């Protein structure tokens, strides 16, 4: 594949500058750098990218290929269908990215630990990760071990490549960065933030196809509204995600009472 025109955020000089400062940065290793920033270039994430709240560097794995065909993959040892990304090429691509040691090194992988809001919040509060995107049948096991890659999965289904998974992970992190979503960025009331799914939301019109907004939400009684939302969140979580509900109850047993985060 031809090297794409490198956009401004894909400038290696900029990386040296921003690794030294506090800008949250995602460095993505991919065979398709033109997929970035993609949907992250619009709306709140896009504005925050343009204004320098966060930085994105998409690096082409193929730039690390050494043979005249710039090949990055080969047939699986032991036989079988498809192709596997070569350990030597991918390791060279990781090394060339000169990632500071404190930055997490992730591999998007269906075999990985399922991504959670907790891990997203950890990643968002750090310096920002390196993210390796697999393609084909995946990548050579030895590079995972030799470069200490943490495998992260989006869920129990198989994508054709790690790029959409990386975009998803970056999106989830970026919306938590200070200054990206304004007041909303506290994420206090959101699904998973307190181990529960979010309560139902309503807005105008007051009546839609014969369905009114629940009376309590227009009562102006904030204590009762908070209690109603809490009860709805618990009922939804119990019904839809018994796994989360069990974990939530276990957490309540072992942890100290939480600070009251309700807003007046
Ligand atoms: N043969 C592999 C799948 C390879 S899919 C297997 O059965 O495990 C090609 C690439 O897409 C993977 O290397 C990974 O980077 C990405 N990918 C696929 N499914 C994914 C998922 N659920 N979560 C994160 N990345 C995924």
Image (tube, grey):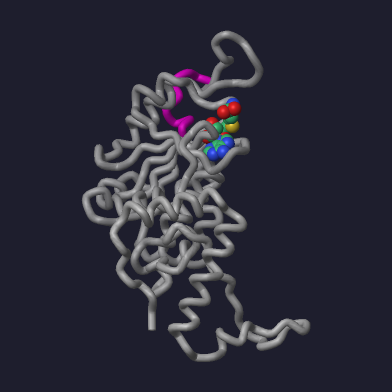
Residue 53 x %, y %: 35, 62
- The stretch drawn in magenta includes residue 87: no
- The stretch drawn in magenta includes residue 63: yes
Q: Which residues are magenta?
A: 60-69
Q: Quadrant of the N terminus?
A: top right
Residue 24 x %, y %: 33, 54
Position of 203 relative to 19 (above/below): below
Q: Residue at x 32, y 64 (%)?
A: 258
Rendered image quadrant of residue 178: bottom left
State left or right for residue 207 relative to residue 85: right
Q: Residue at x 50, y 62 (%)?
A: 191
Q: Given the current orientation, which residue lies at the most extreme top position?
A: 78
Q: Quadrant of the C terminus?
A: bottom left
Position of 143 relative to 6 (above/below): above
Position of 45 relative to 225 (above/below): above
Rendered image quadrant of residue 75: top right
Residue 43 x %, y %: 52, 66
Residue 220 x %, y %: 50, 91
């Amino acid at each position: 594949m031809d090297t794409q025109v490198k956009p401004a955020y894909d400038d290696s000089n900029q990386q040296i500058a921003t690794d030294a400062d506090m800008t949250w940065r995602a460095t993505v290793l991919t065979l398709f750098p033109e997929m970035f920033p993609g949907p992250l270039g619009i709306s709140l994430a896009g504005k925050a990218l343009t204004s320098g709240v966060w930085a994105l560097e998409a690096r082409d794995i193929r730039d690390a290929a050494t043979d005249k065909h710039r090949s990055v993959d080969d047939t699986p040892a032991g036989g079988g269908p498809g192709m596997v990304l070569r350990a030597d090429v991918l390791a060279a691509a990781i090394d060339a990215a000169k990632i500071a040691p404190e930055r997490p090194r992730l591999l998007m992988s269906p075999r990985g630990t399922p991504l959670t809001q907790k891990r997203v919040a950890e990643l968002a509060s750090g310096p920002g990760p390196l993210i390796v995107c697999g393609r084909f049948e995946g990548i050579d096991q030895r590079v995972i071990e030799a470069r200490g890659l943490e495998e992260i999965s989006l869920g129990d289904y198989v994508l054709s490549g790690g790029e959409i998974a990386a975009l998803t992970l970056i999106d989830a992190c970026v919306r938590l960065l200070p200054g990206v979503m304004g007041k909303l960025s506290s994420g206090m009331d959101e699904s998973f933030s307190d181990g529960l799914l979010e309560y139902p939301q309503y807005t105008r019109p007051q009546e839609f196809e014969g369905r009114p907004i629940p009376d309590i939400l227009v009562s102006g009684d904030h204590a009762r509204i908070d209690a109603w939302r809490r009860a709805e969140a618990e009922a939804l979580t119990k019904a839809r995600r018994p796994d989360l509900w069990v974990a939530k109850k276990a957490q309540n047993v072992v942890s100290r009472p939480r600070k009251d985060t309700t807003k007046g």
